[in-house]
Every structure is written in C-alpha cells, then in structure tokens.
Amino acid sequence: MSVNVLVTRPSMPPMDEYIEEIKDLWESYWITNMGEKHQILQSQLKSYLQSDNVELMVNGHMSLELTLQAMKLQGEVITTPYTFVSTTHAIVRSGLTPVFCDVDPDTYTIDTEKIEMLITDYTSAILPVHVYGNVCNIEEIQRIANKYDLKVIYDACHSFGETYHDKGVGAYGDASCFSFHATKVFHSIEGGAVCYRNQELGKRLEYLKNFGIDGPESVQDIGANAKMNEFSAAMGICNLRHIEEEIQKRKKIDCRYRSHLEGVKGIKLRQEDKNVQYNYAYFPVVFEKEFGATRNEIFDALAREGIVTRKYFYPITNSLECYHRRFDATKTPNALYISKHVLTLPIYSDLSIDQVDCICEIILKMQRKSLYGTLEH
Ligand code: T4K
C-alpha cells in the first residue's frame, strides 16, 4: 500500500465553528492588541493548564525570549542541545551564554546528575526542555536551583496539557513556555504562552510583549511585539473545545505504533512515567545498531512510499553552523548519539490506523531485509 503522509498535520476545528467565533470581529473592528478573544483564551488556559498566571504570546519562541528578558538574567544559562533550535537561539539572542548539559539516554531530557558540575559564578538559570512531552526530573532540578539560587524556565513547547503528579506541568519552576504552533497538539495557528509564578514577572511580560509600553505615556523597557492577534486567539478558543478528543485520538495512534514496535530488537521507544499524563505530541523512535537498518535508511524507505518523517532533533543545536564551532557537541555524547539515531514518525489525530500499520510494516520489512537479506521471512 502506498500512502501520502506528513509527519504531522494541524487539527482544524469545524469550519462553521471558527466562522461563528470570528463573526463578531467584523462588528467590533478590534482585531489585535489584547482584544476580547485574547482575554477569553487567556482565562480559559488558566483553567486548562491549571495555572493562576498565564500570559499569551505570539509564539513559543518569543515566550522564551521575553521570559529571559523579564527575569533580567545575565551570564550563563544551563540548557540542553537536544531540542528545536528555538531554545538555544532564545538564550543567545537574549545576550546570554548557553552552557550545554547532556541528556538522559532514556528520556532525552536534561541529565540532572550533570548539572551541578556546570554551575559557575556566572550561572543565572537552568532552561530544561520537556522534549517530546517527556517531563524533566522536576524535583531534582528544583533542588539544584534552590541550592544555587538559580531561576528555572522550562521549555514546555511540547507539553501542552500534560500533568505531572496531577498538576499542570506549567505549575513547576519559575516559568514554563508553551508553543501553540500549527504543528502542535493544541494550536492557535501561531501562538504561545508563559505560565509563571511571580506577579512582578507577569507584569513585565505583559508590557514586554507590547514594546515595553506600560501606560499611555510610559515605556518601561525595550520590549518587542509578541501579542497574539484575535484571529489566532479565536482559533485557540475553538481548538481548546476539542483538545481532549485530540489527545485521545493521538493516544490510540501511539498505542498502535507500540503494538508493532515495542520489544523489537534495536528499537527504543519512550518508557512511560506513571506520574505523567501525556499529550502524545510526538512518536520518536531510536534505531540502535542491532536493528540492522540505519535511521537514514528507514527515513529514505518511508520517503519512497510517500511517508514524510522527521529527524527531530538532528543536528543538535550545539553543532549548528550558525554558532561557528563555538560549542563542542562531543561534550554532550548522549544528545549527539540520539540525534543521529532518532526518527519521529507521523502522528496527528486524523492519521488512520491503516496508515500506522503500513508505516510499521515498511520499518519491519527494512529490518528483515538488513538482517536476513530478504523482505520475506
Ligand atoms: N521550543 C521547542 C522545543 C520547539 O519544538 C519549538 C517549536 C519552539 C521552542 C518554538 O515554538 P514556536 O515559536 O514555533 O511556537 C516545526 C514548527 O514550526 C515548530 O513550531 C516546532 N517547534 C518544530 C519542532 O517543528 P519545522 O521547521 O519542522 O516545520 P515544518 O514547516 O517543516 O512543518 C512540519 C510538518 O508539519 C510538515 O511536514 C507538514 C506539517 N504542516 C506544517 C505546517 C506549518 C502542515 O501540515 N501544515 C502547516 O501549516 O518546525
């Protein structure tokens, strides 16, 4: 069977529902700058994300940048290179120095045993990533942060709606930054939000996203433009109504993949943490040597059948050419290894079970071919 599948596809609300939601924008003529839809979505997200403090943003990236700016951080920020480029860029573009900590080989999140050895007099914060929705070792990160008086900002762009010990993931650390990009479990076309603890930080985020303007004749800081517009907020309002169904459909796809791939020699899947309620944002598979076929061969074999997978996250950010060899990726060997062996398989709510079966069949055929030299076996 030949299918045409992309790694992800945005979930669209019923068109009538969105049209209904945006109708009043033609009456109000208020289409951006913290209008009514913005207020409604922000308030609904406080409840959904179980966080008293939520500031909507134009995207996940600006959520990170403005949070770093609002905290007035200086010096070094300990983070991981196993992430989307945005995380590292946000640190560097904020005038801070990223210090890369390796990741845990099983969860791909920051290896908390390696954080303390990277702390110097210049360290001001830790910026771990809940990569693929795998929740970091929150307790240990907080213990270290408290001991050295460091801020903790989570890149929570992959973990919308997840809970850890029954609390929204945004409730941990000093702040958590979410992405509502079209490719995410929940989207507002483009969008993002910061969940935060400290009210002062919230005030700064509010004016930093609007050029630093904090009153009719007052500009407090050198801010940016990171406001979510009303059409995006309306999309968010619609999608939030369907979020539980979205996550359940993804869970079924995740289960189906596991039914084919779990226990296969040379295939490593995420081990679930029973304290986490997942959102099934991504389906990463690490292909080890024993599998036979390499990650790149599987990528190509799937592509030949019209199935687009992604090597999220290859190359790792401390090896990117834009950083001109400023960092040494061999110092984060786990991250380097995973980036060379991982493939994220298609997952989105409308992906059919037949398509999942077909993807797995192609992968398993590749194994038979490399181990036994035949497609039959
Ligand atoms: N931190 C982390 C850990 C992140 O993963 C991200 C974003 C951020 C921070 C920053 O958040 P944002 O500022 O983006 O809110 C995509 C997304 O653009 C990006 O949001 C996401 N992470 C990253 C992991 O993936 P690309 O360059 O892979 O996107 P693209 O255009 O290749 O799209 C991927 C697939 O999605 C395509 O194969 C087709 C499908 N697609 C995409 C779009 C845009 C659609 O079907 N429809 C669409 O409209 O970065």
Image: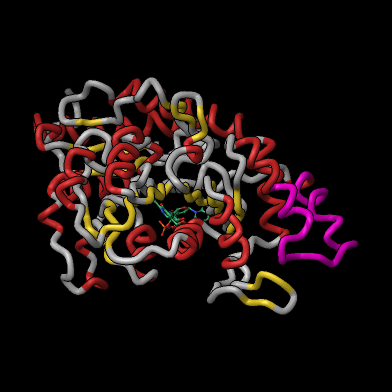
Pick the residue in front: 337 or 99.
99
Please report the residue visible at 38 percent of the width from the left and 28 percent of the height from the top.
357
Q: Residue at x 14, y 33 (%)?
A: 291
Q: Residue at x 37, y 28 (%)?
A: 257
Instruction: Using residue 58 as the reference point, say whether residue 294 is left or right of it.
Output: left
Query: What is the quadrant of the C terminus in the image?
Result: top left
- Foreground: 226 or 215? 215
In which image quadrant can residue 317 be found?
bottom left
**Coordinates of residue 26 in the picture (x, y in percent):** 86, 63
- Give residue 261's quadrant in the image: top left
Q: Start and end of the magenta stretch?
A: 17-41
Asked whether residue 353 appears in the rendered view, the answer is no
Check the image and report above or below for 117 versus 241. below
- Total residue callouts: 0
**Magenta span includes 22:** yes
- Left/right placement of residue 69 relative to residue 224 reads left
Majority secondary structure of the magenta segment? helix
In this view, which residue lies farthest toward the bottom? 217
Q: Is residue 255 above or below residue 350?
A: above
Image x and y of residue 269, in percent: 28, 30
Quarter the N terminus occupies? top left
Q: Nearer the viewer, residue 174 or 338?
A: 174
Residue 214, x across and y down, in percent: 66, 69
